[in-house]
Image (tube, grey):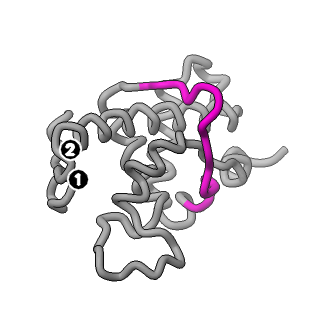
């Protein structure tokens, strides 16, 4: 039997294409990009995705991805290999929010689904901030403030 972490590592995390265009690409650097004049807060997409997921978890905003209009740019292993403690936190948060109770401990699909849904909820919160003020996240402190003000 494969370990839960190994099973999770192979899963691709999904997000809505609209969130990729309006949030992730705007706030994250894309590997291999030639863009050097416009500094982005996140150097990679997984960082923005993880930030959105944490915002979703903090605010208990879980939104199903629904059908159509989704994409995935990286596997869970990218988060695990680059931000191990963040990956562990996402797993624990997903386990705490799963409706499958203890059965979620061995269900990688359930954990990924919960992370995706809370990330989607976080992206909706971020999008609402950007609708209010398009330049809100131009200030680097706004990224941390967004997490702290919602405690």
Is 65 in the magenta? yes
In the figure, is residue 120 to the left or right of 144?
Answer: right
What percent of the width, then of the height, locates residue 101?
Answer: 58, 19
Within the image, what quadrant is residue 37 found in? Answer: bottom left
Which residue is found at the position 39% from the left and 63% from the top? 28
Q: Secondary structure at mark 2?
A: helix
Within the image, what quadrant is residue 66 found in? Answer: top right
Which residue is found at the position 38% from the left and 50% from the top? 23
Residues at marks 1 and 2, CA–CA distance in whole angstroms = 5 Å
What percent of the width, then of the height, locates residue 87?
Answer: 50, 52
| CB under 8 Å between discs 1 and 2 | yes
Which residue corresponds to mark 2? 146
Which residue is found at the position 62% from the left and 50% from the top? 72
Q: Is residue 138 above or below residue 51?
A: below
Predominant SS along the magenta part = loop
In the figure, is residue 110 to the left or right of 44?
Answer: right
Task: Identify the residue at the far right of this view.
Answer: 1
Which residue is found at the position 60% from the left and 40% from the top? 70
Q: For mark 2, does the 10 Å Cα neighbourhood hold few (<14), some (14 to 19), or many (20 or more) residues?
A: some
Q: Write the start and end of the magenta stretch as one range.
A: 62-78
Q: Is residue 99 above or below residue 141?
A: above
Q: Nearer the viewer, residue 78 or 4?
A: 78
What percent of the width, then of the height, locates residue 80?
Answer: 55, 59
Q: Quadrant of the N terminus?
A: top right
Q: Quadrant of the C terminus?
A: top left
Which residue corresponds to mark 1? 143
């Amino acid at each position: 039997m494969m370990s839960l972490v190994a099973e999770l590592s192979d899963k691709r995390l999904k997000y809505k294409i609209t969130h990729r265009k309006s949030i992730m690409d705007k706030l994250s650097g894309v590997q291999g990009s030639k863009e050097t004049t416009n500094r982005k807060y996140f150097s990679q997409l997984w960082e923005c995705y993880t930030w959105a997921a944490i915002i979703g978890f903090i605010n208990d905003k879980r939104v199903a991805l629904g059908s159509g209009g989704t994409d995935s740019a990286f596997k869970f292993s990218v988060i695990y290999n680059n931000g191990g403690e963040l990956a562990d936190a996402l797993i624990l948060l997903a386990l705490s929010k799963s409706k499958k109770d203890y059965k979620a401990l061995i269900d990688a699909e359930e954990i990924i689904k919960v992370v995706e849904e809370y990330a989607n909820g976080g992206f909706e919160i971020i999008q609402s901030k950007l609708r209010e003020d398009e330049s809100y996240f131009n200030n680097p402190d706004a990224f941390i403030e967004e997490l702290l003000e919602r405690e």
